[in-house]
Image (spheres, helix red, strand yellow):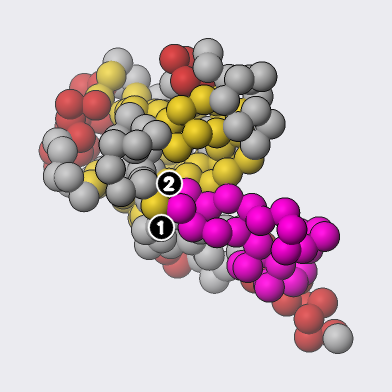
Amino acid sequence: MILSDKDIKDLINKGEIQVSSEDGKDPIANVHCASLDFRLGRYFKVYDHAKYAVLDPSKAETLQNATKLITIEDDSPFIVQPGEFVLGVTMEKIKVPDYLVARCEGRSSIGRLGIIIHSTAGFVDPGFEGTITLEITNINRMPVALYPGMRIGQFAFERMTSEAEIPYYRKHSSKYQNQSLVEESRIHLDPEFQKRQVAK
């Protein structure tokens, strides 16, 4: 069951859904009929294609060293070139209670520019706390300017049948809890890749 604006506001006011940002803006202002808008942060990571021939999920060094951080300090735009894939981050930090899941979706107005804000990671687990790393792709033939602070996506919240027995913060393999900046993939920490490294 997707929460309405009334329910989202009520849970924010009760502190069940927690939303904060560096500028201290009241999140209630970004609540719409069935979602909560979030804004683009000022940190981006772009892949340095000259560094590695391939991104290997079993090798931490190819994942952690293949990107460079770009920080937008003023009102300048970040230009996403056609076909480019970059990592961004939400301005808002969110904390999801153990009985809800959140879905991260793009805004229609952004989609009409050809910008996709997540490749596959649109699901936010119950118990997650932190910013959301955005997987931004420009499928347009024209470059698109993105500005930190602009509303770029939205969260829809769904109530589960019961509280999670093992919410994200208690999950043994949770890799992104309390993230604040842009985070690359940490897939090398998955159990199947840990086993491969031990076997070597």
Classify the position of the N terminus by image quarter. top left
Residue placed most toward the observer, 1 or 15: 15
* Residue 180 on image: x %, y %: 37, 58
Question: Mark on residue 21?
Answer: none
Magenta part of the chain: 44-70
Q: Residue at x 53, y 13 (%)?
A: 112
The image quadrant that residue 194 belongs to is: bottom right
The residue beneath circle 1 is 181
Residues tagged 1 and 2 counted as in contact (Cβ below 8 A): yes
Q: How packed is label 2: few (under 14 Cα within 10 Å), some, or many (20 or more)?
A: many
Q: Is residue 59 above or below residue 160?
A: below
Three-letter code for the amino acid on which mark 2 is drawn: Val
In this view of the protein, which residue sits in the foreground, 29 or 110? 110
On the image, the x and y values in percent for residue 190 come to 68, 67
Residue 61 relative to residue 37: left or right:
right
Circle 2 — which element? strand
Residue placed under numbered mark 2 in the picture: 89
Classify the position of the C terminus by image quarter. Answer: bottom right
Residue 56 in view here: yes
Q: Position of residue 107 (x, y in %)?
A: 44, 21
Left or right relative to 107: residue 29: left
Q: Amino acid at mark 1?
A: Leu
Q: Is residue 92 left or right of residue 27?
A: right
| Res. 12 image quadrant | top left
In the image, what residue occupies the spot 45% across and 37% down?
A: 78
Q: Is residue 40 left or right of residue 69?
A: left
Identified at 21% across, 50% down, the residue is 22
Q: Position of residue 80 (x, y in %)?
A: 55, 33
Q: Secondary structure at mark 1?
A: loop
Magenta stretch encompasses residue 45:
yes
